[in-house]
Amino acid sequence: VREGFRRFSRSGEGDGARCRLEVDGSAGGGGETDAVKTSASGNVEWKFFDRARLYVKGGDGGDGCVAFRREKGISKGGPAGGNGGNGGTVYLVADKGKNTLARFRGRVHFRGAPGKNGQGKGRHGVAGSSEEVTVPLGTVVRNEKGELIGDLCFDGQRLAVASGGRGGRGNEAFKSDRDVAPRFSEKGETGEEHWLNLELKLVADVGIIGVPNAGKSTLLRKLSNAKPDVADYPFTTVIPTLGICDLKWFDLEGRSLVFADIPGLLEGAHDGKGLGVAFLRHIERCRILIHLVSGASEDPIGDYEAINQELELFNVGLMDKPQVVLINKVDIPEVKEKIGEIEAGLRSKMSHKRLAAISAASGEGVPTVIKRLVKLVDSMPQDELNVLITDEEIREREERRRAEEKDFTVTLEEPSRFRVNGVMVERVVKMTNWDYIEGLDRLQRVLEASGVNKALKNAGAVDGDVVTIAGYEFNFYGNENVFTAMAIQ
């Protein structure tokens, strides 16, 4: 039991007994028990589960093997060391069946399996299994610097967030006319690792917005199988709720709409008042908006204007989303008496004619509105989801990143000591098996071919100076062949 929580206890006896989870008002216990803390940075914000921080690491590649073919009757069988298996990659996969990031409350570390080492007789190591992490539609992925990595908006969409390391090559792979019996291999490449920040922006056909106690949750219960809390006081709904409306009840067989009940907004919501920012970001992925206005409000016209102002201040683009304005609670006699006055006031403020009067409680006017909503949704482009980055843009960015990996820098840290930094050159050094002198010879040839030796010479390096790459220190030799350099020395 985590600190600050007490075990659930049973209230009453017999068939009427029910479980109750008590939450302490403070971690130390004592005092009165509060069901929910209401501070802006407290448990209410935590209940959304629309933000999460994950650690992901691709599996390390397996090491290559140094071995030779040894069979009776076969002399000089040649190299037979197999390659190591590639490490498993970590993927984020969009799943339309999920609508919260709550699963990451208890587990935040996800790793791909490492590849197996290569073996003799040319046997290659088995690749490590990948890790697939399911997330809701509308999940935005950023790295620790805040840079956008991906935007998962379609069911089944996959995003590789931590690539597995490449398996090291065995000595069989290095056989050539120049070296028919190589006695070295590569180590496996280390898998990528990152901390990621996930942010959920719910994807829905229709978002229901309005001031607190306008009847949004009542309307969602009427339209779908969702069961949000309903009561006669503001802020009954404290988390966004999704519901699926089966349109067969409205003579539209085989169709459905996804509705999102957005908790009530207050003036100043764009600045975070009443957790407004946490609510407003879920509106960005709704294709159209139902703006629910309570006819029983003291100032329904003012409520309508206040909500639109908050949308515009948070994101100007939200005002471009089609709105359907519904006057709710027309089943109340007092509201029915002044419905004409309310409609006239709203029309004077609206830039469109999508206005209707309904009762979410009794269902009056709802079927007609739903049929019009379906026509409005069908008239909109299918890709109207405000996707932040496409798969094609991700591929182009990955190609640019790989091209930049070839770049490196040479720094003189102190007399006769140099440091080389660069993604590709560091990878080659890490994968070099330093137990074999021939492996060092190959590293020397790679440094010569990639221009590192030339850059070191231009920086003033001479034979015998110390070079540090990826934490490995070795002596610099300007000659391409390490054996020749050692003989000269």
Image (cartoon, rainbow, N blue to C red):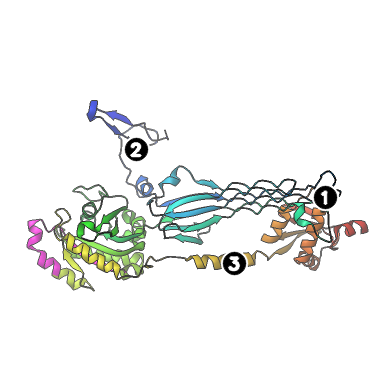
Q: Looking at the image, which residue is at 36% across and 32% down?
A: 6
Q: Nearer the viewer, residue 194 or 255?
A: 255
**Which image quadrant: the N terminus?**
top left
Look at label 1 and name its amino acid. Answer: Gly
Is residue 336 one of those drawn in magenta? yes
Judging from the image, what secondary structure is the residue with disc 1 in? loop
Q: Is residue 8 left or right of residue 78?
A: left
Q: Nearer the viewer, residue 488 or 341?
A: 488
Say if residue 33 shows up in the picture.
yes
Q: Of tags 2 and 3, which is closer to the observer?
A: 3
Tell me the amino acid under the disc marked 3: Glu
**Residue numbers of the magenta segment:** 321-343
**Residue placed at 29% from the left, 66% from the top?**
377
User: Dot 1, crowdedness within 10 Å: few (<14), some or many (≥20)?
Assistant: few
Disc nearer the start of the sequence (2/3): 2
Which element type, helix, strand or loop, lies under badge 3? helix
Counting from the top left corner in percent of width and height, residue 142 is at 49, 58
Q: CA distance from mark 2 to mark 3?
A: 52 Å
User: Is 71 on the left or on the right of 141, as rendered?
Assistant: right
**Badge 2 amino acid:** Gly
Residue under label 3 = 399
Q: Residue 287 location in percent, x, y?
A: 32, 65
Q: Which residue was labeled with disc 1?
A: 77
What residue is drawn where x is 36% and y is 66%? 315
Tag nearer the camera, 1 or 3? 1
Is there any visible trace of residue 263 in the rendered image? Answer: no
Mark 2 and mark 1: span between their CA atoms?
Answer: 75 Å
Left-right relation of 298 to 61 = left
| Observer-nearest of 146 and 28 | 146
Secondary structure found at label 2: loop
The tag on residue 25 is 2
